[in-house]
Image (spheres, rainbow, N blue to C red):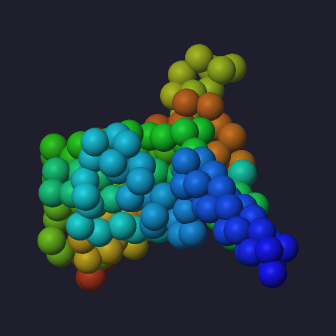
Amino acid sequence: MKRKKQIVRNIILIALTALLFLWQGGYHLTPEAVFRSAEKAEWLGPAAEVIEVGQRDDGCLCLAGMEEKGFYMVSAKPILGIFWKHTNEHWDGYFLVKVKTRAWVSEDIIVGQTRETDAVEVVCVLEGWNIEKNDWQEIGHYTIPVGENGFFSMTLGSDTAETIDCVVKEVICKNAAGEVIGKNS
């Protein structure tokens, strides 16, 4: 009987040690739990809405938290098959939207927000630095649907994502009829 008690006690101690390791190590069961933990660590939020933005090339899932004056992004990386962990590899910080429409290129993802209530899509014009010409050159036009909250995002292709110094030159907002209702250059 004493042997069985020792086995049960040791199993409980091992389970508690494993849980303590996971808790202290920042491992979470869902990407949203990672997001909420990162919010607390960075003294942000709590965001009323969390949006899945996209997946980066290295497997990190990008999440955005919407606030009244802007949004912020957090990356969660899958670890050990079932856990998720916050990674600072892609911490982009807080994106303050002071104008009607604003967009950024965050590594390989275009993210932005518009306050145009009738906007159903935006066209982002990207430009990148051309070393040979020593000047900015237009890379392309990307049409992105706008969510109900005004947030929009799109994962870029690998050819565009590898362009160094890629920036958003202009954002054009369009309504359901395809008419331009706003521009931000």
Depth order, front residue of 162/131: 162
Say if residue 30 shows up in the picture. yes
Q: Residue furthest right?
A: 3
Image location (x, y in percent) of residue 110 = 47, 53
Q: Is residue 106 left or right of residue 113?
A: right
Query: Which residue shows up at 77% across the image and 69% down it?
Result: 6
* Vertical comparison of 142 with 147: above or below: above
Q: Residue at x 72, y 51 (%)?
A: 58
Nearest the eye: 56 or 165: 56
Where is residue 72 shown, x and y percent of the image?
Answer: 35, 49
In this picture, residue 56 sits left or right of residue 185? right
Confirm whether residue 102 shows in the render.
no
Quarter holding the N terminus is bottom right
User: Dividing the picture into quarters, in which one does residue 153 lie?
Assistant: bottom left
| Quadrant of image for the C terminus | top left
Q: Position of residue 181 (x, y in %)?
A: 19, 65
Left or right, 138 with reference to 58: left
Q: Depth check: 112 or 142 in front?
A: 112
